[in-house]
Amino acid sequence: MMIEFSPVIVHVDMDAFFAAVEVRNNPHLKGKPVIVGGGAGQRGVVSTCSYEARKFGVHSGMSAVKARRLCPQGVFISSGLRGYVYVSARLQQIFEKYTPIVEPFSVDEASMDITGTEKLFGGPIELVEALKQEIRDQLQLSCSVGIAPSKYLAKLASGLNKPDGLTVLDRDEFKRIYYPRPVDALWGVGESTKKVLAGKGIHTVADLASTDSKLLKGILGKNGEGLSVISQGIDRTKAVPYRERPHDKSMSHETTLGKDLQDPTRIKATVLWLADKVARRLRRRGYIGRTISVKIRSHDFQTITRSHTINHPTDRCDVVFQQAMRLIPKEYGMKIPVRLLGVRMSQLIKIRFNDQGDETLNHKTGESVQLELMVNPQEEEIGRLTEAVDAIRDRYGEKSIKLAGTLLS
Ligand code: TTP
Ligand code: MG
């Protein structure tokens, strides 16, 4: 297809990402049905699986027990999240060689606005071919790519010819392919929306596109309008590079102390409370972060900040707390009374998502697409504790549990 549209948006989605990284790291697994998550002795769910395993009907989110039944010869592997996050960061660097406008979408997906820059590579298709080749050469991984006039269409296109696909989708082609399909062929439309729409006689994407947007708003609330636009193949949202995303750049929390603190124990308790707030927000929104910063204002309004970047990104309160404490110069709280304390996490990496996108990420409903984090037993223990604490707070509110150390403050 000739590419005559503008802007030109490219969406890259790695093929069987976690499984592909495992196969690359263990070449004897090549060609085998590899299933990540729910490994030996593990309960839980499948994070993803190789295309060989998909032939047996195994898919993401399925219980490991069922996967074993469908594919007894499958090679089950615990996920090594840190390795995947590292590959994800390498991918981001490669994308940025082709255009400065790269918007990460999840651990293995990104949108790129290549409008204008494609000329440097001879055209959009040539650019994407060069990109795919570079990913193959540098990372020994394959991806599927969509090229379209919008982010949404590019995302859909990337899924049309998996694995190792390259698909161009303009608006006319979108209508031709999607209009006859059921509404849940659209990305972001799940079972419950499908049911509600079916109750109103709306079954196909074409039905959706021809329904008045006000009517859809009446049926689905705020999301109805968005869905109406998208069903017509229209999406005007721009790709926003990571660095420019205001909400996702960093997460922080600070507090002005009731009275200037000159008590190291209380400083410690306050930092723990702040670290807990920040870590919890990271988990809730599906991020891990690498850079921890503290902000300290002394009684005379002098403010200092200190930061440190750790090797393994984290969303854990205890790690954030320890790093934050190390960053606070000893004299604060001893000789110098403290007025304000803040903890910030930046260099964030998105590791969890749900099919509603970021804004509606719900800790509970997001669980079905949660990455399975397999770490050493001690970390796993802390992880379980963290999950339990999160669950109680989700149910009974922020104040229902306090970390022991913060009871002081
Ligand atoms: P996806 O891109 O949805 O899946 P995939 O890359 O494994 O396979 P595909 O070729 O169809 O794109 O997700 C990327 C990674 O995110 C995936 O490898 C594992 C993780 N993930 C989970 O842990 N749980 C989930 O439910 C899903 C959907 C993904
Ligand atoms: Mg993928």
Image: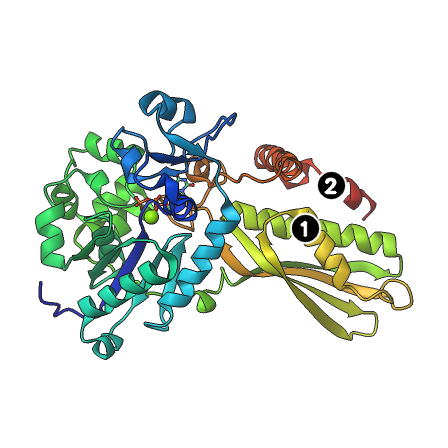
Q: Nearer the viewer, mark 2 or mark 1?
A: 1
Q: Which residue corresponds to the image point at 35% horizontal and 26% vertical from the top-left? A: 73
Position of residue 180 measured from the top left corner of the image (x, y, whole percent): 10, 41
Q: Secondary structure at mark 2?
A: loop
Identify which amino acid the numbered label 2 is placed on. Leu
181 with respect to 55 (left or right): left
Position of residue 48 measured from the top left corner of the image (x, y, whole percent): 37, 38
Ligand 1 within 8 angstroms of badge 1 C-beta: no
Decide: is 158 above or below 377.
below
- In front here: 69 or 270? 69
Identify which amino acid the numbered label 1 is placed on. Val
- In front here: 350 or 118? 118
Residue farthest along the top direction in this orientation: 69
Position of residue 270 measured from the top left corner of the image (x, y, whole percent): 77, 53
Decide: is 93 above or below 62.
below
Position of residue 189 measured from the top left corner of the image (x, y, whole percent): 28, 41
362 with respect to 155 (left or right): right
User: Residue under circle 2?
Assistant: 403
Instruction: Answer whether residue 241 is visible to the viewer in this image.
Output: no
User: Residue under circle 1?
Assistant: 319
- In front here: 322 or 387? 322
395 with respect to 201 (left or right): right
Quadrant of the rendering where the N terminus is positioned: bottom left
142 with respect to 245 (left or right): left
N-terminal of the pair, mark 2 or mark 1, is 1
